[in-house]
């Protein structure tokens, strides 16, 4: 599946629009922004992921003989357009916020600057890739936060919506802070740690639980995590596990990575009793791992109850982001110029819903950090050619409730431009870090968030504001379109 050509991974209307542009030729260059409107899971932030797969997609973007034959069979596309597609490739520019970065609503995550046919074609695949991985990375970041430093293992492959969702969901979860995955193919493809224990079927295939544990310990003495809830956790599973650990110790086998896993029952109560029994037997450093339909809220609750769990296997609720199964990213036209020599003319989409009114123009995003703490003060969306002096005061304001203003004193903040060039004139100029490097980057990114923004319920929202210049352009366009609408109604 990973070897598939994804050029036809698109909605049909992208191709019909392309043919329309082809039959009415122009030299239009456009700017499209990919962004989202609301943080998943009612959280205070999201995590950007999927850029490396976008790069792979763009590099391989071409129509094969089989693609052309299929499109011809639809009897919707004319021969001259199909002939054009035979030599199609991407020639534009792409700017993106790097993977692992903390992101917020309404700011461009990916900006495409390209001839209109090229920019139109890549919409669907780009959104498919970034929406999925950013969603799972965000969910995983919340789970990791709830665990308060305990390791999170991603265990969701069998419940993911298909192989690709399992593979790339695990990749996204690793970026967001998981310590490993059960997904072996993900481990091979992205060089990330893989880990696992054994199933209840292993226990049931032996004459008794003790023999099953002893056999497993003999095979995997350096990774001996025993599943103790097949029959009776406290009266059978844990006593048999302790018996095996004692025999390993007496045999001189080092007890390095060892412990128990529970997959059912009252995990708070059972983990506390298990800890008592393990400590009494001299195994206070044993890992106590838990699974069983965990998510960030249940983990947070168990931690609050004093559960003695220090390793968590999270599957279905993470890999599917079960409580918020869609990221909601969109791709909107923001500017047009008729040829390379002209300047971009801003474009805006109107809506009865003020949140759906787009931000016009060729833009970039600056992150404003508090100089003393390194924490995020706000993000500022501005025009791509705008510059700012960190020594000067900056006044930012809410673009919807404009009376809400904040002055940031000159010298008290630093700026970082978030969008970086990925493709220039069709050539990739960006080298993606490894997944484990992205994991380190994401950890540092999450440290720039205030605790109030990271909390699971009712978090503080980070300000995402518009520069004065951009706000003025947007206001003028809205006023102009409003007057045009009035004139039309008067007729």
Image (tube, helix red, strand yellow):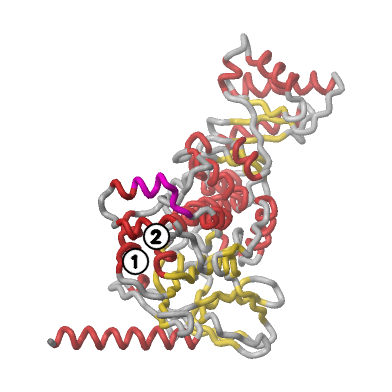
| Residue found at x 58% / y 13% | 205
Mark 1 vs mark 2, CA separation in Å: 9 Å
Q: Chief secondary structure of the magenta span?
A: helix
Q: Are the residues flagged by discs 1 and 2 in contact, CB closer than 8 Å?
A: yes
Category of crowding for the residue at label 1, using alpha-carbon neighbours closer than 10 angstroms: few (below 14), some (14–19), many (at least 20): some
Q: Position of residue 115 (x, y in %)?
A: 44, 70
Which residues fall within the magenta stretch? 62-70
Q: Residue furthest right?
A: 252
Which one is in front, 312 or 124? Answer: 124
Q: Position of residue 194 (x, y in %)?
A: 66, 37
Magenta-drawn stretch contains 311:
no
Which residue is disc 2 drawn over?
A: 84
Which residue is disc 1 drawn over?
A: 22
Seen in the image, is 218 located left or right of residue 478? right
Tell me the number on the disc at residue 36. none
Q: Is residue 123 above or below residue 226?
A: below
Q: In terms of sequence position, does the residue under pointer 1 or pointer 2 come before the other? A: 1
| Residue found at x 75% / y 31% | 279
| Residue found at x 35% / y 56% | 82
Q: Is residue 76 above or below residue 475?
A: above
**Quarter occupied by the C terminus:** bottom left
Which one is in front, 442 or 59? Answer: 59
Q: Is residue 346 above or below residue 78?
A: below
């Amino acid at each position: 599946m990973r070897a598939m050509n994804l050029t036809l991974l698109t909605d049909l209307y992208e191709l019909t629009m392309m043919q329309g542009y082809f039959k009415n030729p122009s030299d239009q260059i456009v700017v499209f922004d990919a962004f989202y409107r609301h943080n998943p899971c009612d959280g205070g932030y999201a995590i950007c992921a999927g850029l490396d797969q976008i790069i792979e997609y763009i590099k391989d973007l071409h129509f094969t003989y089989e693609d052309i034959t299929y499109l011809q069979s639809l009897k919707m596309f004319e021969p001259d357009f199909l002939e054009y597609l035979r030599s199609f490739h991407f020639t534009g520019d792409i700017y993106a916020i790097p993977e692992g970065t903390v992101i917020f609503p309404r700011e461009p995550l990916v900006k495409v600057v390209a001839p209109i046919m090229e920019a139109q074609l890549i919409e669907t695949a780009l959104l498919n890739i970034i929406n999925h991985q950013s969603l799972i990375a965000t969910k995983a970041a919340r789970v990791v936060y709830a665990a308060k430093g305990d390791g999170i293992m991603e265990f969701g492959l069998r419940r993911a919506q298909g192989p690709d969702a399992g593979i790339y969901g695990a990749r996204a979860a690793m970026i967001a802070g998981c310590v490993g995955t059960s997904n072996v193919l993900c481990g091979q493809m992205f060089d990330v740690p893989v880990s696992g224990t054994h199933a209840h079927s292993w226990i049931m295939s032996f004459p008794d639980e003790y023999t099953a544990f002893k056999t497993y310990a003999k095979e995997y003495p350096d990774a001996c995590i025993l599943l103790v809830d097949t029959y009776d956790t406290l009266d059978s599973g844990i006593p048999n596990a302790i018996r095996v650990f004692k025999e390993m110790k007496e045999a001189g086998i080092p007890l390095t990575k060892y412990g128990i896993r529970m997959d059912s029952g009252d995990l708070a109560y059972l983990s506390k009793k298990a800890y008592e029994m393990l400590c009494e037997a001299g195994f206070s450093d044993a890992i106590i791992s838990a699974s069983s339909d965990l998510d960030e809220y249940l983990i947070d609750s168990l931690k609050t109850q004093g559960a003695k769990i220090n390793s968590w296997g999270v599957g279905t609720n993470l890999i599917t982001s079960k409580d918020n199964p869609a990221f909601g990213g969109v791709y909107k036209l923001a500017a047009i110029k008729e040829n390379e020599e002209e300047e971009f003319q801003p474009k805006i989409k109107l809506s009865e819903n003020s949140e759906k009114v787009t931000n016009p123009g060729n833009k970039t995003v600056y992150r404003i950090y508090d100089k003393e703490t390194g924490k995020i003060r706000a993000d500022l969306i501005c025009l791509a050619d705008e510059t700012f002096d960190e020594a000067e005061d900056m006044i930012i304001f809410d673009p919807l409730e404009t009376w809400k203003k904040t002055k940031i004193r000159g010298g008290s903040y630093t700026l970082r431009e978030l969008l970086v060039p990925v493709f220039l004139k069709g050539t990739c100029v960006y080298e993606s870090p490894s997944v484990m490097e992205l994991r380190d980057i994401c950890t540092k990114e999450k440290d720039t968030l205030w605790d109030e923004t990271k909390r699971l319920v009712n978090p503080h929202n980070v300000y995402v504001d518009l520069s004065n210049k951009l706000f003025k352009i947007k206001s003028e366009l809205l006023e102009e379109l409003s007057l045009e609408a009035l004139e039309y109604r008067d007729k």
